Amino acid sequence: MAPGSGPDQAAQDLLQLATERFGDLRQAEAKLVLAAPKGEFANCGPSGDFNDPSNDPAKADAWGPERQVRAGLIRWLCTDREAASRVDPKGIQLMGAKLTGPLELSFASVPFPFLLKLCSLTEDSDFTSLSLPALSLMGSRIRSMAADGLDVKGDVFLGGGFLAEGEVRLHDAQIGGSLNCGGGTFRNPGKNALNADRASVKGSLFLRHGFHAEGEVRLLNAQIGGDLNCGGGTFKNPGGKAFDADRASVKGSLFLRHGFQAEGEVRLLNAQIGGDLNCGGGTFKNTPHKDVPGSGKALNAGGVNVMRNVLLSRQTGEKGKEFTAEGEVRLLGAQIGGDLLCAGGRFKNPPQNGVPESGTALYADRVDVRGSVSLRQGFTAEGEVRLAGAQIGGDLNCRGGMFSALNGQGTRVDHHLLLRDVRDAKNAIIDLRNASADALFDHEASWPAEGNLYLDGFRYGRVSYGPREAEARLKWLALQREFTPQPYRQLAKVLRESGDDRGARLVLYEMEKLRRTEQSRIWRNRLHNEKLSRSSLVMGWPRYGLARAWGSVLRYTIGYGFRLQCTLYWLIGLTVLGTLLFGFGYMGGSMAPTEREAYACFEKQGWPPRHYQAFNPFIYALENSVPVLKLGQDSAWAPDPGPREQERAGAVNFPTWKWLVRVRPHAWVTPWLLRCYRWLQIVSGWMLATLFVAGVTGVVRKE
């Protein structure tokens, strides 16, 4: 405003300048020129009501010349030094007008705000490198807007019914306040609808409350000082990227919740988020199609760094709805400072023949979560859930979840792994190879079907809830598709540390039995299937037979070193059988003294001299069964080396009761039989003793 003049005079002066510059002004143009020095809205329609249908810019084609404003006039007001000096600090405020011609403000430095409300811009707008305090196109309709390098000290408002029929470019824009596109519509199907790559917004960026985009919304490398709020926004770009914020930095939280809808890929690759990534109740759809490049990933946040929580869960509140993703949700290598919450979320990406992007519902390999991962309370995944190599500082909670497959290979869980109340568990595939957890929390009803469990390399400190008996846990291990020894050793270690030594030995025995069975199977397959030479076959079968026989010996004698009490049972059996055989043999005359004179006396009268050690079949059998035990029976008595003189002479000097058991003695308890059994006792005793020592010292077993 010129010095020494009031608003009315300034308005008249500006009107005169405009008339000299543009000739006769239209009614709307005169209103604008007269309102600018007063800081008032120039209302060009019949009503000042924002919601009056007469002010709807969609009907601008029916507006007469009285509502038209030349774009050149606006440029003159903004860039002409004399004209701009007469504009009030509140700036240009225009409502319900139709701008004709391209609005060209590139590289201009405007000292006041620029507000177009419910206006229609019939040509493209160029705001490249425009500098001004504030910009608002609230409720206006434009064709396209190029605003690369836009520098706004305050807020930019492109919402409240704003509509763009072409690309809105905010490349490298600098916005000192907030960028609010809430309720705005950006249409440029198949191309960029809103492009704010490398834009810097000191405040928050709002793409919410009815925001609608047809085409890609780009925020690559954008810097946002507050929140990025897309709650309730709709993003459509089927088969392409609906929302691309790769490498964006958001100091606050990123909200893709409360009715957020995306048709096309939502990308957050390597984005930095200072608060939460909240997708509660959002809908993401980008189903994989064989002939559609770029399809298949609904939410792609690989490498994202979120300082607080990631919520892919049910929306909170009475009218809450589930997070829904049709297509892969990818968190590959993500860094999450809080929890990953997927409770109640629905992830759908079942495998399809010939479609490589299908089959994985949640892809979170190598994710690093400082808190817990929750896949519970109605969580549903149609497709594989991958957490391979994940680092989880809290719990991995799958209670009440439903999985097609859970891939936790190499996952580290610092607290509990909860696999209880899993829905439709029998049809799930659980892969915990090389995973680890401090404690296991499960239930037999949540175990998968046989062949659907992989546990090789899985390490856990204890079973905090669920079956803890060795017999029940052996059923759990038997669900594995292939035998590997590590799960059995791990279970034995857990049982031993809990004080169940008997259970630990039982598990290790079962492990060794299965290991040798597996070795036999491999041997048989190799000998049957491989094209071996004749010499290899000749050498192979005996080796296989000997190995199998030796395995049977170890199994039934000392239980592979884990059932050493079996040795005692064998010794007792040998001793009892020997007591019977040697007892009957003695009563039948098949046992004789080893000393010559005693033998001669025994030959003549049927019993040894009075001074000679009497025969005791139990002690005799015990000495032969236990190699280190020497009580004198073994050296004093032996099976008769030759036929009896009494038998040759027909003498009958044995007591009558002995003859009762001497009916045809050579037919069943002969000296030869006793001699063979004695040899068997001695050999078996030594072998059992050796195996017992080997089992005690750990030579046989490998724990």
Image: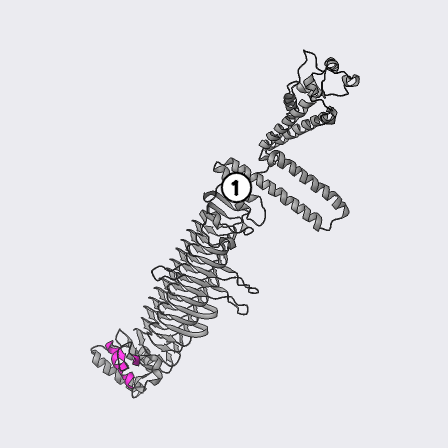
Front one among 92 and 407: 407
Can residue 26 be found in the magenta stretch? yes
607 shown above or below 136:
above
Considering the image in quadrants, where does the N terminus appear?
A: bottom left
Q: Residue at x 36, y 77 (%)?
A: 141
User: In the drawing, does residue 700 fall left or right of residue 527?
Assistant: left
The image quadrant that residue 256 belongs to is: bottom left
Which amino acid type is marked by label 1? Glu
**Which residues lie in the magenta part?**
25-54
* Nearer the observer, 75 or 191: 191
Q: Residue at x 58, y 38 (%)?
A: 509
Q: What residue would you read off at disc 1?
A: 471
| Residue located 52% across and 61% down the image | 359
Q: Position of residue 376 (x, y in %)?
A: 43, 54
Give x and y (percent) for residue 408: 50, 52
Residue 635: tell me if it is visible: no
